[in-house]
Image: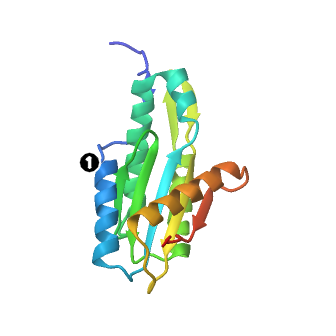
């Protein structure tokens, strides 16, 4: 009987349901914008902070384990909210929140960010705390805005949140260019 501790301890007991990928995110966002062009809609992009450093220190396999852990947190955090979650490129996740206004989108983004920060992972006996930054774009009910403008606004909000050292959640209204 070995008393050695496992190299990696995750606080997650179950595997997450499969998240859609970036292409599915784009298709679902386009479909939402076309099927309900005047409904409220929020798009949240969540990015794990310091992912490159995590890969360098602990390797790509363990960094991927952290992303799977974040996927579970994201799915659990959505709870009963009628939303869709997607794994985008690298350490990014995308959330589509139909019938969700800006304050609700921001609130959900901040709650997910706090849940991720509360999760502690252990690599070879060293504790690692994950953090995330989020950007959100919200379309007000009664206004039109296409998928491209929604995605661009969420990306810009994420960039602004990253640039602001004090704020990890930023919300923008999308602008449709003629």
Q: Does 52 appear above or below 89? A: above
The residue tagged 1 is 18
Viewer-proximal residue among 14 and 174 = 174
Res. 11 visible in picture: no
Res. 170 visible in picture: yes
Residue ranking furthest to the top? 1
Q: Residue 4 location in percent, x, y?
A: 42, 15
Classify mark 1: residues with Cα within 10 Å, few (<14), some (14-19) or many (20+). few
Q: Secondary structure at mark 1?
A: loop
The reply, left or right, for residue 48 in relation to residue 4 is right
Residue positioned 40% across, 33% down in the render: 64
Viewer-proximal residue among 116 and 126 = 116
Residue positioned 41% across, 42% down in the render: 89
Viewer-proximal residue among 57 and 161 = 161
Q: Residue 40 location in percent, x, y?
A: 43, 79
Q: Give the quadrant of residue 130.
A: top right
Viewer-proximal residue among 10 and 21 = 21
Quadrant that contains the N terminus: top left
Residue ranking furthest to the bottom? 142
């Amino acid at each position: 009987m070995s008393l050695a501790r496992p190299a990696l301890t995750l606080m997650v007991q179950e595997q997450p349901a499969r998240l859609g990928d970036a292409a599915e995110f784009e298709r679902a966002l386009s479909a939402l914008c076309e099927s309900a062009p005047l409904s409220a809609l929020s798009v949240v992009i969540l990015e794990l902070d310091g992912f490159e450093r995590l890969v360098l220190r602990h390797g790509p396999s363990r960094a991927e384990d952290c992303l799977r852990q974040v996927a579970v947190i994201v799915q659990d955090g959505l709870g009963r909210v009628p939303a869709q979650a997607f794994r985008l490129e690298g350490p990014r996740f995308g959330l589509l929140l139909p019938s969700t206004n800006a304050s609700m989108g921001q609130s959900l983004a901040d709650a997910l960010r706090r849940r991720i920060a509360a999760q502690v992972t252990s690599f070879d006996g060293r504790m690692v705390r994950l953090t995330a930054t989020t950007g959100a774009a919200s379309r007000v009910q009664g206004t039109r805005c296409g998928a491209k403008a929604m995605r661009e606004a969420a990306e810009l909000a994420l960039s602004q949140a990253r640039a602001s050292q004090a704020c990890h959640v930023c919300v923008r209204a999308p602008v449709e260019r003629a």
